[in-house]
Image: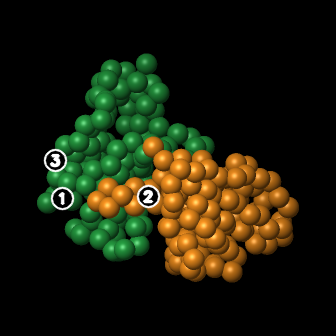
Chain colours: A orange, B green
Amino acid sequence: GAVVSQHPSRVICKSGTSVKIECRSLDFQATTMFWYRQFPKQSLMLMATSNEGSKATYEQGVEKDKFLINHASLTLSTLTVTSAHPEDSSFYICSAFRDRGSTDTQYFGPGTRLTVL
Amino acid sequence: QKEVEQNSGPLSVPEGAIASLNCTYSDRGSQSFFWYRQYSGKSPELIMSIYSNGDKEDGRFTAQLNKASQYVSLLIRDSQPSDSATYLCAVGGMDSSYKLIFGSGTRLLVRP
């Protein structure tokens, strides 16, 4: 299957700081990537759709000024959590969309566990 | 609102048995269907994808799709303790956003 990486895998930061998370598709080009958040014992919640070369599309209730997304190339999308607070502590997972025509599929990165003190 | 429903479980089966996981979806225009496996603390891993009515087999896994009933299932034959995880059903729509709608997942426990 396709490989998607995320960095860092785990980050602990102080309240008020900003954290950047990188998502890379290693063996295919991804014009579309997605960012999800998952709280303990809950399912994935889509935060935003990241499109290469254009602005991200945010889901309802997700603050675009707090969660900055940049999709600078066909293999890299970044999520920056600005002025992080303890309630932002969560498991952040990206996925990359691989367009194969009739058999398109999303492949997930390994996730980034963010802890805000 | 588009929804994907799964029984949260846990579904407990003995080792070697067949585990049957079910999922229903509300958007009749959905075109793509996926099963992901998620171990605790890890990200989802794609198990199966299915796009047309009928069965699709891959090793011990069989996905079944019935678009008329808006129903998709995953069968795991010869269940192993290592299959114990949460299984997420995901459905893709007809629009160009490529977004997937995820169910809340079914937790599977395979007893040794």
Q: Which mark is residue B67?
A: 1
Query: Which quadrant, please, contains the N terminus of chain B?
Result: bottom left
Q: Residue at x 83, y 58 (%)?
A: A13
Q: In the image, A107: left or right of B22?
A: right
The chain to which mark 1 is attached is B
Residue B46, picture quadrant? top left
Q: Which mark is residue A67?
A: none
Q: In the image, A5: left or right of A105?
A: right
Instruction: Please tell me whether mark 3 or mark 2 is closer to you in this view.
Output: 2
Instruction: Please tell me whether mark 1 or mark 3 is closer to you in this view.
Output: 3
The amino acid on which the numbered mark 2 sits, given as a three-letter code, is Arg
The amino acid on which the numbered mark 3 sits, given as a three-letter code, is Gly
The chain to which mark 3 is attached is B
* Disc 1/disc 3 C-alpha distance (Å): 9 Å
* Disc 1/disc 2 C-alpha distance (Å): 24 Å
Q: Residue at x 50, y 67 (%)?
A: A31
On screen, residue A21 above or below B61: below
Say which element carries label 3. strand
Residue A60: tell me if it is visible: yes
Instruction: Please tell me whether mark 1 or mark 2 is closer to you in this view.
Output: 2
Residue tagged 3: B54
Q: Alpha-carbon neighbours of circle 3 within 10 Å: few (<14), some, or many (≥20)?
A: few
Residue tagged 2: A98
* Disc 3/disc 2 C-alpha distance (Å): 24 Å
